[in-house]
Image (cartoon, rainbow, N blue to C red):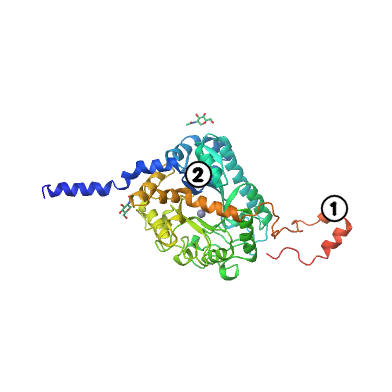
Protein backbone atom coordinates (compact mmCIF):
# COMPACT_ATOMS: atom_id res chain seq x y z
CA UNK A 1 0.00 0.00 0.00
CA UNK A 2 3.00 2.27 -0.35
CA UNK A 3 2.01 3.28 -3.91
CA UNK A 4 -0.81 5.72 -4.56
CA UNK A 5 -3.70 3.81 -6.13
CA UNK A 6 -3.73 6.04 -9.23
CA UNK A 7 -0.17 4.96 -9.97
CA UNK A 8 -1.08 1.30 -9.71
CA UNK A 9 -4.08 1.89 -11.94
CA UNK A 10 -1.88 3.64 -14.49
CA UNK A 11 0.62 0.78 -14.43
CA UNK A 12 -2.13 -1.78 -15.01
CA UNK A 13 -3.57 0.25 -17.85
CA UNK A 14 -0.28 0.55 -19.70
CA UNK A 15 0.33 -3.16 -19.07
CA UNK A 16 -2.92 -4.09 -20.84
CA UNK A 17 -2.29 -1.53 -23.53
CA UNK A 18 1.19 -2.68 -24.50
CA UNK A 19 0.59 -6.42 -24.20
CA UNK A 20 0.86 -7.60 -27.82
CA UNK A 21 3.20 -4.78 -28.88
CA UNK A 22 5.64 -6.00 -26.21
CA UNK A 23 6.07 -9.10 -28.37
CA UNK A 24 6.68 -7.34 -31.70
CA UNK A 25 10.46 -7.73 -31.60
CA UNK A 26 10.18 -11.44 -30.78
CA UNK A 27 7.60 -11.79 -33.57
CA UNK A 28 9.92 -10.17 -36.11
CA UNK A 29 12.80 -12.39 -35.01
CA UNK A 30 10.66 -15.51 -35.52
CA UNK A 31 9.58 -14.29 -38.97
CA UNK A 32 13.23 -13.90 -39.90
CA UNK A 33 14.21 -17.42 -38.90
CA UNK A 34 11.22 -19.36 -40.21
CA UNK A 35 8.87 -18.64 -43.15
CA UNK A 36 5.37 -17.29 -42.72
CA UNK A 37 3.27 -18.75 -45.54
CA UNK A 38 0.11 -16.90 -46.51
CA UNK A 39 -2.10 -19.29 -48.49
CA UNK A 40 -4.34 -16.73 -50.15
CA UNK A 41 -3.31 -13.46 -51.80
CA UNK A 42 -5.37 -12.16 -54.72
CA UNK A 43 -2.73 -9.81 -56.16
CA UNK A 44 -2.99 -11.23 -59.74
CA UNK A 45 -6.57 -10.03 -60.08
CA UNK A 46 -5.41 -6.50 -59.15
CA UNK A 47 -2.89 -6.55 -62.03
CA UNK A 48 -5.57 -7.72 -64.38
CA UNK A 49 -8.10 -5.13 -63.19
CA UNK A 50 -5.77 -2.13 -63.10
CA UNK A 51 -4.29 -2.17 -66.54
CA UNK A 52 -5.38 -2.96 -70.05
CA UNK A 53 -1.89 -4.39 -70.32
CA UNK A 54 -1.53 -6.16 -66.95
CA UNK A 55 2.19 -6.79 -67.42
CA UNK A 56 2.70 -3.02 -67.16
CA UNK A 57 1.21 -3.18 -63.67
CA UNK A 58 3.49 -6.10 -62.71
CA UNK A 59 6.53 -3.83 -63.20
CA UNK A 60 5.23 -1.35 -60.62
CA UNK A 61 5.11 -3.80 -57.70
CA UNK A 62 8.52 -2.65 -56.41
CA UNK A 63 7.00 0.66 -55.25
CA UNK A 64 3.80 1.83 -53.57
CA UNK A 65 1.07 -0.10 -55.34
CA UNK A 66 -2.74 0.03 -55.01
CA UNK A 67 -4.38 -2.54 -52.77
CA UNK A 68 -2.93 -4.43 -49.82
CA UNK A 69 0.29 -5.77 -51.32
CA UNK A 70 3.53 -4.53 -52.86
CA UNK A 71 7.14 -5.58 -52.44
CA UNK A 72 8.10 -2.90 -49.88
CA UNK A 73 5.11 -3.85 -47.69
CA UNK A 74 5.73 -7.61 -48.13
CA UNK A 75 9.30 -7.00 -46.94
CA UNK A 76 8.22 -4.88 -43.99
CA UNK A 77 5.76 -7.64 -43.06
CA UNK A 78 8.56 -10.23 -43.43
CA UNK A 79 6.41 -12.60 -45.46
CA UNK A 80 8.21 -15.86 -46.22
CA UNK A 81 5.94 -17.23 -48.92
CA UNK A 82 2.68 -16.54 -50.70
CA UNK A 83 0.18 -18.60 -52.60
CA UNK A 84 -0.79 -16.19 -55.38
CA UNK A 85 -4.34 -16.86 -56.45
CA UNK A 86 -5.22 -18.21 -59.88
CA UNK A 87 -8.80 -17.05 -60.15
CA UNK A 88 -11.35 -15.83 -62.64
CA UNK A 89 -14.85 -14.80 -61.59
CA UNK A 90 -17.70 -17.30 -61.61
CA UNK A 91 -19.86 -17.28 -64.77
CA UNK A 92 -22.78 -15.51 -63.12
CA UNK A 93 -20.43 -12.58 -62.41
CA UNK A 94 -18.24 -12.60 -65.49
CA UNK A 95 -20.59 -14.01 -68.11
CA UNK A 96 -20.05 -17.16 -70.16
CA UNK A 97 -22.93 -19.20 -68.78
CA UNK A 98 -22.01 -22.92 -68.83
CA UNK A 99 -25.71 -23.84 -68.68
CA UNK A 100 -27.55 -25.87 -66.06
CA UNK A 101 -25.49 -29.01 -66.72
CA UNK A 102 -22.17 -27.08 -67.07
CA UNK A 103 -21.52 -28.34 -70.60
CA UNK A 104 -21.59 -25.05 -72.56
CA UNK A 105 -18.03 -23.81 -73.24
CA UNK A 106 -16.75 -20.72 -71.38
CA UNK A 107 -13.48 -18.73 -71.44
CA UNK A 108 -12.43 -19.75 -67.96
CA UNK A 109 -9.55 -22.03 -68.94
CA UNK A 110 -7.99 -19.19 -70.94
CA UNK A 111 -8.58 -16.73 -68.10
CA UNK A 112 -6.97 -19.06 -65.55
CA UNK A 113 -3.96 -19.62 -67.82
CA UNK A 114 -3.57 -15.86 -68.14
CA UNK A 115 -3.47 -15.60 -64.35
CA UNK A 116 -0.70 -18.22 -64.21
CA UNK A 117 1.16 -16.20 -66.84
CA UNK A 118 0.78 -13.05 -64.73
CA UNK A 119 2.19 -14.81 -61.65
CA UNK A 120 5.12 -16.18 -63.64
CA UNK A 121 5.76 -12.70 -65.04
CA UNK A 122 5.64 -11.17 -61.57
CA UNK A 123 8.31 -13.55 -60.33
CA UNK A 124 10.42 -13.05 -63.47
CA UNK A 125 10.16 -9.26 -63.15
CA UNK A 126 11.22 -9.22 -59.48
CA UNK A 127 13.86 -11.97 -59.21
CA UNK A 128 15.60 -10.42 -56.19
CA UNK A 129 12.39 -10.57 -54.16
CA UNK A 130 10.35 -13.49 -55.48
CA UNK A 131 11.12 -17.10 -56.37
CA UNK A 132 8.79 -19.79 -57.69
CA UNK A 133 8.22 -22.74 -55.38
CA UNK A 134 6.11 -25.88 -55.29
CA UNK A 135 7.44 -28.06 -52.48
CA UNK A 136 8.45 -27.39 -48.89
CA UNK A 137 12.09 -27.77 -49.99
CA UNK A 138 11.57 -25.06 -52.61
CA UNK A 139 10.08 -22.81 -49.94
CA UNK A 140 13.11 -23.21 -47.68
CA UNK A 141 15.48 -22.64 -50.61
CA UNK A 142 13.71 -19.38 -51.51
CA UNK A 143 13.52 -18.30 -47.87
CA UNK A 144 17.21 -18.97 -47.20
CA UNK A 145 18.17 -16.94 -50.26
CA UNK A 146 16.17 -14.00 -48.91
CA UNK A 147 13.33 -14.29 -51.42
CA UNK A 148 9.60 -14.69 -50.95
CA UNK A 149 8.56 -18.18 -52.05
CA UNK A 150 5.85 -17.87 -54.68
CA UNK A 151 3.34 -20.67 -55.05
CA UNK A 152 0.19 -21.07 -57.11
CA UNK A 153 -3.22 -21.68 -55.56
CA UNK A 154 -6.20 -22.11 -57.85
CA UNK A 155 -9.58 -20.98 -56.54
CA UNK A 156 -12.49 -22.77 -58.15
CA UNK A 157 -13.16 -25.74 -60.41
CA UNK A 158 -15.23 -23.66 -62.84
CA UNK A 159 -11.84 -22.91 -64.49
CA UNK A 160 -11.15 -26.55 -65.44
CA UNK A 161 -13.40 -26.80 -68.50
CA UNK A 162 -14.86 -29.95 -66.89
CA UNK A 163 -11.64 -31.72 -67.80
CA UNK A 164 -9.18 -33.71 -65.71
CA UNK A 165 -6.72 -33.31 -68.59
CA UNK A 166 -6.79 -29.57 -67.97
CA UNK A 167 -6.22 -30.24 -64.27
CA UNK A 168 -3.11 -32.27 -65.06
CA UNK A 169 -1.71 -29.39 -67.10
CA UNK A 170 -2.31 -26.98 -64.21
CA UNK A 171 -0.47 -29.48 -62.00
CA UNK A 172 2.49 -29.33 -64.40
CA UNK A 173 2.38 -25.54 -64.23
CA UNK A 174 2.89 -25.81 -60.48
CA UNK A 175 -0.61 -25.29 -59.09
CA UNK A 176 -0.34 -26.51 -55.50
CA UNK A 177 -3.93 -26.35 -54.27
CA UNK A 178 -7.33 -26.37 -55.91
CA UNK A 179 -10.36 -24.94 -54.13
CA UNK A 180 -13.21 -27.27 -55.07
CA UNK A 181 -15.52 -24.31 -55.74
CA UNK A 182 -15.52 -20.54 -55.64
CA UNK A 183 -18.93 -18.89 -55.16
CA UNK A 184 -20.62 -20.99 -57.85
CA UNK A 185 -21.39 -24.66 -58.25
CA UNK A 186 -19.36 -26.45 -60.90
CA UNK A 187 -19.61 -29.74 -62.77
CA UNK A 188 -17.48 -31.16 -59.94
CA UNK A 189 -18.80 -29.77 -56.67
CA UNK A 190 -21.36 -27.70 -54.80
CA UNK A 191 -20.44 -24.36 -53.26
CA UNK A 192 -21.71 -22.81 -50.05
CA UNK A 193 -24.63 -20.54 -50.76
CA UNK A 194 -23.10 -17.72 -48.70
CA UNK A 195 -22.61 -15.22 -51.49
CA UNK A 196 -26.19 -14.03 -51.52
CA UNK A 197 -26.74 -14.67 -47.82
CA UNK A 198 -29.63 -16.96 -48.68
CA UNK A 199 -29.42 -20.70 -48.08
CA UNK A 200 -31.53 -21.58 -51.11
CA UNK A 201 -30.28 -19.15 -53.67
CA UNK A 202 -27.82 -21.40 -55.47
CA UNK A 203 -30.22 -24.30 -55.57
CA UNK A 204 -29.08 -27.92 -55.55
CA UNK A 205 -27.40 -29.16 -58.72
CA UNK A 206 -25.74 -32.34 -57.46
CA UNK A 207 -27.63 -34.93 -55.44
CA UNK A 208 -27.12 -34.20 -51.74
CA UNK A 209 -25.53 -30.81 -52.45
CA UNK A 210 -21.99 -32.17 -52.50
CA UNK A 211 -19.68 -33.70 -55.10
CA UNK A 212 -20.77 -35.04 -58.48
CA UNK A 213 -19.34 -38.38 -59.72
CA UNK A 214 -16.85 -36.32 -61.73
CA UNK A 215 -16.00 -34.43 -58.51
CA UNK A 216 -15.19 -37.74 -56.79
CA UNK A 217 -12.83 -38.56 -59.68
CA UNK A 218 -11.34 -35.08 -59.36
CA UNK A 219 -10.46 -35.58 -55.68
CA UNK A 220 -8.72 -38.86 -56.53
CA UNK A 221 -6.86 -37.17 -59.37
CA UNK A 222 -5.81 -34.28 -57.09
CA UNK A 223 -4.34 -36.87 -54.71
CA UNK A 224 -2.55 -38.55 -57.60
CA UNK A 225 -0.95 -35.38 -59.01
CA UNK A 226 -0.10 -33.92 -55.57
CA UNK A 227 -2.42 -30.92 -55.57
CA UNK A 228 -3.90 -30.10 -52.17
CA UNK A 229 -7.69 -30.44 -51.89
CA UNK A 230 -8.97 -27.06 -50.63
CA UNK A 231 -12.43 -27.06 -49.04
CA UNK A 232 -12.83 -23.29 -48.54
CA UNK A 233 -15.99 -21.94 -50.22
CA UNK A 234 -17.55 -25.39 -50.55
CA UNK A 235 -20.83 -26.65 -49.10
CA UNK A 236 -20.69 -28.73 -45.93
CA UNK A 237 -21.70 -31.79 -47.97
CA UNK A 238 -18.82 -31.22 -50.38
CA UNK A 239 -16.45 -30.97 -47.38
CA UNK A 240 -17.71 -34.22 -45.87
CA UNK A 241 -17.65 -36.15 -49.14
CA UNK A 242 -14.19 -34.90 -50.11
CA UNK A 243 -12.84 -35.87 -46.67
CA UNK A 244 -14.36 -39.32 -47.22
CA UNK A 245 -12.75 -39.75 -50.65
CA UNK A 246 -9.34 -38.10 -50.21
CA UNK A 247 -6.32 -40.30 -49.46
CA UNK A 248 -4.21 -37.19 -48.76
CA UNK A 249 -4.68 -34.45 -46.15
CA UNK A 250 -7.23 -31.74 -46.93
CA UNK A 251 -6.87 -28.01 -46.29
CA UNK A 252 -8.98 -24.93 -45.87
CA UNK A 253 -6.71 -22.29 -47.43
CA UNK A 254 -8.79 -19.36 -46.14
CA UNK A 255 -11.59 -19.92 -43.64
CA UNK A 256 -12.46 -19.50 -39.97
CA UNK A 257 -14.28 -21.43 -37.23
CA UNK A 258 -18.08 -21.48 -37.40
CA UNK A 259 -18.38 -21.91 -33.63
CA UNK A 260 -16.65 -18.53 -33.19
CA UNK A 261 -18.56 -16.75 -35.94
CA UNK A 262 -21.64 -18.42 -37.38
CA UNK A 263 -20.96 -18.03 -41.08
CA UNK A 264 -21.23 -20.69 -43.83
CA UNK A 265 -17.69 -19.85 -45.05
CA UNK A 266 -16.32 -21.04 -41.70
CA UNK A 267 -15.69 -24.67 -40.74
CA UNK A 268 -18.17 -26.21 -38.29
CA UNK A 269 -16.94 -28.20 -35.30
CA UNK A 270 -18.49 -31.47 -36.50
CA UNK A 271 -16.42 -31.26 -39.70
CA UNK A 272 -13.29 -30.24 -37.77
CA UNK A 273 -13.88 -33.43 -35.78
CA UNK A 274 -13.12 -35.42 -38.96
CA UNK A 275 -9.57 -33.99 -39.07
CA UNK A 276 -6.78 -35.63 -37.09
CA UNK A 277 -4.80 -38.84 -36.90
CA UNK A 278 -7.37 -40.91 -35.05
CA UNK A 279 -9.68 -43.66 -36.27
CA UNK A 280 -11.84 -42.46 -39.16
CA UNK A 281 -10.02 -39.13 -39.42
CA UNK A 282 -7.66 -37.69 -42.04
CA UNK A 283 -4.94 -35.13 -41.58
CA UNK A 284 -5.51 -31.54 -42.59
CA UNK A 285 -5.41 -27.94 -41.47
CA UNK A 286 -7.30 -24.67 -41.46
CA UNK A 287 -5.54 -21.45 -42.50
CA UNK A 288 -7.34 -18.68 -40.64
CA UNK A 289 -8.57 -15.89 -42.90
CA UNK A 290 -8.56 -12.11 -42.24
CA UNK A 291 -11.84 -11.32 -44.02
CA UNK A 292 -13.73 -9.30 -41.34
CA UNK A 293 -17.19 -10.66 -42.22
CA UNK A 294 -16.08 -14.19 -41.38
CA UNK A 295 -14.36 -13.20 -38.14
CA UNK A 296 -16.72 -11.19 -35.99
CA UNK A 297 -19.17 -8.40 -35.43
CA UNK A 298 -18.35 -5.20 -37.32
CA UNK A 299 -16.84 -2.75 -36.73
CA UNK A 300 -13.85 -3.37 -34.47
CA UNK A 301 -12.67 -6.74 -35.76
CA UNK A 302 -8.94 -6.94 -34.96
CA UNK A 303 -5.99 -9.32 -34.78
CA UNK A 304 -7.18 -10.71 -31.43
CA UNK A 305 -10.38 -11.90 -33.09
CA UNK A 306 -8.41 -13.66 -35.81
CA UNK A 307 -6.45 -15.42 -33.08
CA UNK A 308 -9.75 -16.38 -31.38
CA UNK A 309 -10.50 -18.44 -34.50
CA UNK A 310 -7.01 -19.95 -34.53
CA UNK A 311 -7.29 -20.89 -30.86
CA UNK A 312 -10.71 -22.48 -31.30
CA UNK A 313 -9.52 -24.53 -34.28
CA UNK A 314 -6.35 -25.42 -32.36
CA UNK A 315 -8.41 -26.58 -29.37
CA UNK A 316 -10.27 -29.05 -31.57
CA UNK A 317 -7.69 -30.30 -34.06
CA UNK A 318 -4.47 -29.17 -32.39
CA UNK A 319 -2.20 -26.18 -32.84
CA UNK A 320 -0.22 -28.26 -35.33
CA UNK A 321 -3.19 -27.93 -37.71
CA UNK A 322 -3.65 -24.16 -37.88
CA UNK A 323 -2.20 -21.56 -40.22
CA UNK A 324 -2.57 -18.08 -41.65
CA UNK A 325 -4.24 -16.72 -44.81
CA UNK A 326 -4.88 -13.03 -45.37
CA UNK A 327 -7.11 -12.90 -48.47
CA UNK A 328 -5.28 -9.61 -49.18
CA UNK A 329 -6.29 -7.92 -52.43
CA UNK A 330 -9.49 -9.96 -52.45
CA UNK A 331 -11.40 -7.97 -49.79
CA UNK A 332 -13.17 -4.62 -49.71
CA UNK A 333 -12.55 -4.26 -45.95
CA UNK A 334 -9.78 -5.26 -43.55
CA UNK A 335 -9.14 -6.24 -39.94
CA UNK A 336 -7.83 -3.50 -37.60
CA UNK A 337 -4.10 -4.02 -37.18
CA UNK A 338 -3.88 -6.30 -40.25
CA UNK A 339 -4.65 -3.74 -42.92
CA UNK A 340 -2.02 -4.77 -45.43
CA UNK A 341 0.99 -6.99 -46.08
CA UNK A 342 3.25 -4.97 -43.78
CA UNK A 343 1.22 -6.02 -40.72
CA UNK A 344 1.87 -9.76 -40.29
CA UNK A 345 4.10 -9.16 -37.22
CA UNK A 346 1.05 -7.86 -35.31
CA UNK A 347 -0.65 -11.24 -35.67
CA UNK A 348 2.45 -13.15 -34.61
CA UNK A 349 2.84 -10.82 -31.60
CA UNK A 350 -0.77 -11.49 -30.64
CA UNK A 351 -0.14 -15.27 -30.69
CA UNK A 352 2.96 -14.83 -28.50
CA UNK A 353 1.09 -12.57 -26.09
CA UNK A 354 -1.49 -15.36 -25.61
CA UNK A 355 1.21 -17.77 -24.55
CA UNK A 356 1.73 -19.68 -27.78
CA UNK A 357 5.21 -21.22 -27.64
CA UNK A 358 7.76 -20.31 -30.34
CA UNK A 359 7.37 -23.85 -31.75
CA UNK A 360 3.60 -23.49 -31.97
CA UNK A 361 3.99 -20.09 -33.62
CA UNK A 362 6.53 -21.39 -36.16
CA UNK A 363 4.06 -24.17 -36.96
CA UNK A 364 1.17 -21.77 -37.44
CA UNK A 365 3.37 -19.54 -39.59
CA UNK A 366 4.26 -22.28 -42.07
CA UNK A 367 5.66 -25.43 -40.47
CA UNK A 368 2.23 -27.05 -40.17
CA UNK A 369 1.40 -26.37 -43.80
CA UNK A 370 4.76 -27.68 -45.02
CA UNK A 371 4.18 -30.91 -43.10
CA UNK A 372 0.82 -31.25 -44.89
CA UNK A 373 2.44 -30.46 -48.26
CA UNK A 374 5.03 -33.18 -47.67
CA UNK A 375 2.28 -35.69 -46.86
CA UNK A 376 0.36 -34.73 -50.00
CA UNK A 377 3.55 -35.27 -52.01
CA UNK A 378 4.01 -38.72 -50.44
CA UNK A 379 0.53 -39.77 -51.60
CA UNK A 380 1.05 -38.44 -55.14
CA UNK A 381 2.02 -40.96 -57.81
CA UNK A 382 4.29 -39.19 -60.26
CA UNK A 383 4.52 -40.63 -63.75
CA UNK A 384 1.44 -42.84 -63.62
CA UNK A 385 -1.20 -42.08 -66.24
CA UNK A 386 -4.02 -42.27 -63.75
CA UNK A 387 -7.26 -44.21 -63.76
CA UNK A 388 -9.46 -41.68 -65.49
CA UNK A 389 -9.28 -39.13 -68.20
CA UNK A 390 -12.18 -36.99 -67.11
CA UNK A 391 -14.34 -35.58 -69.81
CA UNK A 392 -11.85 -35.76 -72.67
CA UNK A 393 -14.29 -36.03 -75.50
CA UNK A 394 -14.60 -36.99 -79.16
CA UNK A 395 -16.82 -33.93 -79.49
CA UNK A 396 -14.83 -30.80 -80.37
CA UNK A 397 -17.92 -28.64 -80.22
CA UNK A 398 -18.26 -27.74 -83.89
CA UNK A 399 -18.48 -31.12 -85.58
CA UNK A 400 -17.10 -31.79 -89.07
CA UNK A 401 -13.60 -32.96 -88.08
CA UNK A 402 -14.36 -36.57 -89.00
CA UNK A 403 -13.35 -35.63 -92.53
CA UNK A 404 -9.75 -36.32 -91.42
CA UNK A 405 -10.44 -39.75 -89.93
CA UNK A 406 -9.35 -42.96 -91.66
CA UNK A 407 -12.50 -44.98 -92.53
CA UNK A 408 -12.00 -47.63 -89.85
CA UNK A 409 -11.71 -44.92 -87.17
CA UNK A 410 -14.82 -43.21 -88.50
CA UNK A 411 -16.77 -46.44 -88.30
CA UNK A 412 -15.62 -47.15 -84.74
CA UNK A 413 -16.49 -43.65 -83.54
CA UNK A 414 -19.92 -43.83 -85.10
CA UNK A 415 -20.56 -47.08 -83.28
CA UNK A 416 -19.47 -45.76 -79.90
CA UNK A 417 -22.28 -45.83 -77.40
CA UNK A 418 -20.80 -43.66 -74.67
CA UNK A 419 -20.06 -40.16 -75.90
CA UNK A 420 -18.33 -38.82 -72.78
CA UNK A 421 -21.05 -36.24 -72.31
CA UNK A 422 -22.50 -37.78 -69.15
CA UNK A 423 -21.15 -35.23 -66.71
C1 LIG B 1 11.18 -0.04 -59.63
O1 LIG B 1 11.84 -0.62 -60.73
C2 LIG B 1 12.02 0.25 -61.81
C3 LIG B 1 12.67 -0.55 -62.93
O2 LIG B 1 11.86 -1.62 -63.32
C4 LIG B 1 12.87 1.44 -61.40
O3 LIG B 1 12.96 2.37 -62.46
C5 LIG B 1 12.24 2.11 -60.19
O4 LIG B 1 13.11 3.14 -59.71
C6 LIG B 1 12.00 1.11 -59.08
N1 LIG B 1 11.31 1.78 -57.98
C7 LIG B 1 11.64 1.58 -56.71
C8 LIG B 1 10.85 2.34 -55.71
O5 LIG B 1 12.53 0.82 -56.39
C1 LIG C 1 -9.45 -6.22 -30.13
O1 LIG C 1 -10.71 -5.74 -29.67
C2 LIG C 1 -11.04 -6.24 -28.36
C3 LIG C 1 -12.42 -5.70 -28.04
O2 LIG C 1 -13.38 -6.28 -28.88
C4 LIG C 1 -10.01 -5.81 -27.34
O3 LIG C 1 -10.30 -6.37 -26.11
C5 LIG C 1 -8.64 -6.28 -27.82
O4 LIG C 1 -7.65 -5.78 -26.94
C6 LIG C 1 -8.32 -5.79 -29.22
N1 LIG C 1 -7.08 -6.37 -29.67
C7 LIG C 1 -6.17 -5.67 -30.30
C8 LIG C 1 -4.93 -6.40 -30.73
O5 LIG C 1 -6.28 -4.49 -30.55
ZN1 LIG D 1 -11.94 -16.92 -51.57
Q: Position of residue 213 (x, y in %)?
A: 64, 66
Q: Seen in the image, is 93 located left or right of residue 77?
A: right
Q: Position of residue 57 (x, y in %)?
A: 54, 38
Q: From the viewer's perspective, is the residue at label 1 or at label 2 nearer?
A: 2
Using the rendered image of the protein, determine whether residue 128 is visible from the camera's viewpoint: yes
Q: Residue at 87% of width from left, 55% of height from top?
A: 406
Label 1 residue SS: helix
Q: Residues within 10 Å of mark 1 (few under 14, many from 20)?
A: few
Using the rendered image of the protein, determine whether residue 94 is visible from the camera's viewpoint: no
Which mark, residue 404? 1
For this rendering, which residue is in front, 385 or 127?
Answer: 385
Q: Position of residue 237 (x, y in %)?
A: 54, 67
Which mark, residue 84? none
Label 2 residue SS: strand
Residue holding disc 2:
81
Q: Residue at 62% of width from left, 66% of height from top?
A: 212
Q: CA distance from mark 1 to mark 2?
A: 49 Å
Q: Earlier in the sequence, mark 1 or mark 2?
A: 2
Amino acid sequence: MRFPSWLLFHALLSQVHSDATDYLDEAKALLEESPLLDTHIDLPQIFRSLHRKPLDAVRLLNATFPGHVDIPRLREGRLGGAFWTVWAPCPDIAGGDPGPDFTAPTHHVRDALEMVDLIQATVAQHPDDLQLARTSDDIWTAFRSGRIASLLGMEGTHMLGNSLSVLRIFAQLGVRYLTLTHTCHSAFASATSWRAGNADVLGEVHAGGGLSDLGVELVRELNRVGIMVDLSHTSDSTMRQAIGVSKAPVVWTHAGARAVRDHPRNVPDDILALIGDGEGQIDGLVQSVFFPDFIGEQPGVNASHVVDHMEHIGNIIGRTRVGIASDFDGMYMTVDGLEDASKYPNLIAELLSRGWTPDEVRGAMGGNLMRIMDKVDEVAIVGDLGETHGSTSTDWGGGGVQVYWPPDVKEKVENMLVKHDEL
